[in-house]
Amino acid sequence: MKSVCVYCGSATGARPLYADAARGLGQALAQAGIGLVFGGGKVGLMGVLADAALAHGGHATGVIPELLVSREVAHTGLSELLIVPDMHQRKKKMADLSDAFVAMPGGVGTLEELFEAFTWAKLGYHHKPVALLNLDGFYDPLLALLQHTVREGFMQQAWLDTLVIEHEPLALLDRLQRYQPPAPDQRSAHRQAM
């Protein structure tokens, strides 16, 4: 695993544990020699995460749309800052550069990115792990909703089980490095239950 895409908030959240975990994940990636790919912002958890990776000798690649650069939220101290025309190209570029996807706490943008990466895996556009850093149960309500989709026949449990879920950065990174994608016959069966 050479690089991990991390989706996270452009705010730091209501509790210090979110920024603490962002620092921990940034440090863990750097110490493991795994590059960080993220949304390129200097604000919120994005900035905390990138600063931690860089402070520990890591490589941080930001991908940011032109519109957000003009609002002066681009992190200019990164190893690499890629400026793209729009959000669609941002997400594609981040996906192309990454070997895994992690969603930390965040708002609707983080959720949208998470679900796109998870859907792309389900459809077979990639076979990379998709993960939640479920800090202090942040994603428990979302996981309950996903279980509801299984009970109601809109998703198979086997596919939901491919979502990697951990509560702290080091355990998450370990799981990502050991991830094995579903076998091709399982993937095609999973695609039948959208």
Image: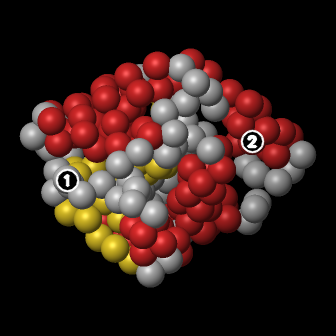
> Which residue is at the front of the view, 31 or 150?
31
Residue 97 % position (x, y): 31, 65
Cα–Cα gap, marks 2 and 1: 38 Å
**Amino acid of disc 1:** Gly
**Left or right relative to 51: residue 85:** right
Residue 41 % position (x, y): 38, 53
Residue 63 % position (x, y): 36, 65
The quarter of the displayed image where residue 33 is located: top left
Q: Is residue 10 visible?
A: yes
> Which residue is at the front of the view, 78 or 102?
78
Residue 77, labelled with which disc? Answer: 1
Q: Is residue 112 above or below residue 15?
A: below
Please state the total of marks drawn on the protein image. 2
- Which class describes the residues within 10 Å of circle 2: few (<14), some (14-19), or many (20+)? some
Q: Is residue 98 visible?
A: no
Residue topped by disc 2:
146
Q: Secondary structure at mark 2?
A: helix
- Which class describes the residues within 10 Å of circle 1: few (<14), some (14-19), or many (20+)? some
* The C terminus: image quadrant: bottom right
**Left or right relative to 166: residue 180:** left
Q: Secondary structure at mark 1?
A: loop
| Sequence-first disc among 2 and 1 | 1
